[in-house]
Every structure is written in C-alpha cells, then in structure tokens.
Image: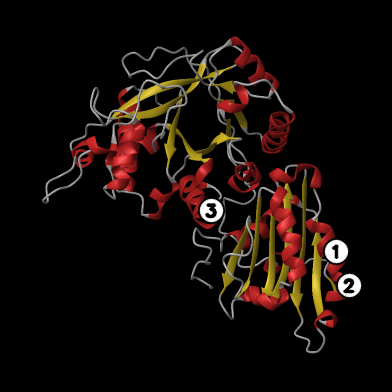
Amino acid sequence: MIDIASENDQSLRPPEPSRVRHRTNGRPSAIEDVINDGLLRTVFQPIVDLGNGSAMGLECLTRGPAGSELESPTALFEAARSAGLATELDWACHIEAIRTSLDGGFGRSLHVFINTEPSSFARPLPVHDIIRQGLDELSIVVEVTERAITADPAALLRTLQQIRSAGCKIAIDDLGVERGSLAFLPFVEPDVIKIDMSLVQRPLTPQSTAIAAAVAADAERRGALVVCEGIETADDRERALVLGADLGQGWLFGRPTSLHECDVTVVEVSVPSIELQSTSAEPALTPWSLVRNSRRRRQATKRELMPISHHLEQSGSHDRSATVVLGAFQRADFFSPATLRRFDVLAEESGFVAALGVEIPEHLVTGVRGVRIPVGHPLEGEWAVTVIGPFYAAALIAKDLGDTGPDDARRFDYVITYDRALVIAAARSLMQHITDNGHPVSDTR
C-alpha cells in the first residue's frame, strides 16, 4: 500500500537508472536490502475537514532510506519492478505503514489511509502479526488507484471483496485523470472518493464540473465522503468546496512528516457505513440468473428486440464519458459488422465499452474490449446489454429459446430493467470475465 508519487512532494526525484543496483552474482540488490532489512519509512499527510481544518485521517506515504538513491517512492518501485519484487515491496510498505500507525497510538480516532497496488491481492493476505493487530486496532481505509481499475476489472472485483472482507473501508484515489475510472464508480462503490489535484489547482471548466456532478451523484446516493487532493492555496480550498468536497488534503494543511513531527487536531469524522449493493457479494453467474423469475419477463423475437437494444446502447448520452456499456452477444457471428460500428462510435465517447461472446476476438476496434467466452459457458445462451452512468442505468437481458431458422426470427425470453442495483449486478456478472489480457477467467461453475 504505497503512494507511487506523493501529490505534493516534488523534492524527491528518482535516481538515474544506472545507479540502482540489482542482483549480480547471486548477491542481494539494493531494493532487496531495503525490503529485507526493514529500511522503509512511513510519513503522514493529514486529511482534514474543510469546514474547521481538523484532521479526520492521515495518509501513509512510504519513503526509502533518507538520503539514499532509493529514498523516493518512484525510485523504490522502479527498482522493485526491475528486480521482480513489486509485490514484495508493496506488502512491506503495508506492514511498515501499519506498524508506524500502531506506534502512533492512533487507535480508531484517526482513519489511516493506505495505498495499494491491486496486483498485490493476487496472492493470499500474508499471515503477519502486525497486519492482524492493525486490522483489530486501526480504522484502515485502503486506497485503490484509478490506473488499476480499467486494466483488469475482474481482478478489481476480487480485490475489493478481499479488502472489505478484512474489515477495511475503500477509497478510490486520483479520480478524474482517466475517464474510465469515473465510469467505474458504481462497481468500486467507494466509501471515500478522492478527486485528483488537477481538478482543484486549475480554474473550473465544464469538464471538471461534469466530473464533480458525477461524483456528487454517486456520493449522495450512497453516503460516501469526498476528498479533494493537492490543496495548496486558499483558492484551491474554495474550488474544492465548489466541487462538493467534504475533506481536503495538501500543503495548505500540512506536508508529509514523520510520526514524531506529526501534530494534528483530531476531529471525530467517521467514514460512513455504506450499504453495499454489489461489491459485498460474489458476482452472479450470468445476467439471466438475476432476472429469470422476474414478473416483467416477456417473450419476443430478435427482430423485435433489436430496436430496444440499440436504444439502450445510446442511452445516457449526456454523460457518456462516465458511462460503462457492456454487451454479451452469445457468439461472434451474432456480433455483426453493424454492431461493431455502433460500439466503435460508443467507445469514442464512453468511459468503458466491452463485448463478450464465444470466439469474439480480443482486439476489435480501439476502445472496445473484446472478451472471448468458452464454448458451452452459460453466457453462450444469453443476450444482454447493460448501460450504467452517473444518472442512468438500464439493461436488456434475454435468454435464447433455442429456435432454429432465420436469425431475426429467433425467440427470446427477456426482461428490460431500469433498477440501478439490478443493472449494476448484471454488469458485474459480465465484468467478472474481463481480465487484463482480454480472456475470461477459467471458472465457468
């Protein structure tokens, strides 16, 4: 759980690549020494209530040995990746952050914000006394960086479930840099939303206010807290308030400091206990498994359902950059050239677009994620289109009745729903198959 680059700490620069030592002749590299010898340090930056300036939390930021070539977090992780030790470094940062927070006696009076690389959760949670003690005694908020969200949605869903199962809250970090991360708010369901400094340190624009509106809609719907990062001036603070932030972080309130230099006034601001609608449970097997008993179940031919599918794909057009469009098309031969053209247009404006089906190629067109479903998977018998934006959610979910004959005369049982929680659950059942290489997970259950 490491901040790759503190938003304000510009004094720390990575070393020249040639200066970072790696393993030679079987001898440990510098990064191995840092990890194995406990040479990491944790510094803290306050997260404050914008109303009264009191601290409700501290973000843990990791540094290497002071004055060394590996002091900056950027240098640490560059060296760790080169040595194949990124996950080991990440967990070492987790442990040091928790250890230092325990030494500070924070208890549950301050929320401890700790960054994570989701890839670290590909391995089981380490059995470590410090981690156990931290989970028992601290109020931990795990920050998931937005750059990891769209790369591997299936891994993201698994990671979120593990984090919540450990009793931690979740924050999404740096929101607003990548439009795809805004689209994923309904799936991450963060307890805390951290708006990137780039939106706070510049004059407000139609784009930044649109992002703020999408964040406000999600936060208000679920009761999440909003933090603006990178607040350095009084003007930044005013913009943060206009953007709807409850909390702020940045040099105006304090630079990253050691535990002994950390002097904050604590305010009891609890991260709300949010009733989760999707990430709290395993995704459903398929969209149809969620609606097959619906009283709205009807029957129609493909010809009759096509206009409905086209309409839903285009829905929510006023906020497309924050929209996720997922389609399951049974087999590649049902994903026609006309459908590909429609999805190509959608991808130009939408936050995330994907098409699933048997033998659908991984590379379709720029911006459209192709996901190949195994032959015989239950999804092969379903047709689904889900569209989710900040202010809109809709889905067409249909089950093939197995007719032979002309394609457009095939009959389907179907359900059309605008129930946001149900649409998100249906989309998650598709998203669990979208991995970093475009291929679905092997478990077909």
Looking at the image, do the residues carrying marks 1 and 2 touch, with CB atoms under 8 Å apart?
A: yes
Q: Position of residue 140 (x, y in %)?
A: 44, 34
- Give the answer, above or below, for where 406 lies relative to 341: below
Q: Is residue 367 left or right of residue 74?
A: right
Q: Is residue 288 left or right of residue 370?
A: right
- Give the answer, above or below, for where 408 lies relative to 27: below
Residue highlighted by disc 3: 157
Q: Is residue 403 visible?
A: yes
Name the secondary structure under disc 3: helix
The structure residue drawn at horizontal position 83% and vertical position 75%, both measured from the top left corner, is: 302
Residue highlighted by disc 1: 308
> What amino acid does circle 2 point to?
Glu
> What amino acid does circle 1 point to?
Ile
Residue highlighted by disc 2: 304
Callout 1 crowding tier (Cα within 10 Å): few <14, some 14–19, many ≥20: some
**Label 1, label 2: how far apart the Cα atoms are:** 8 Å
Q: How many marks?
A: 3
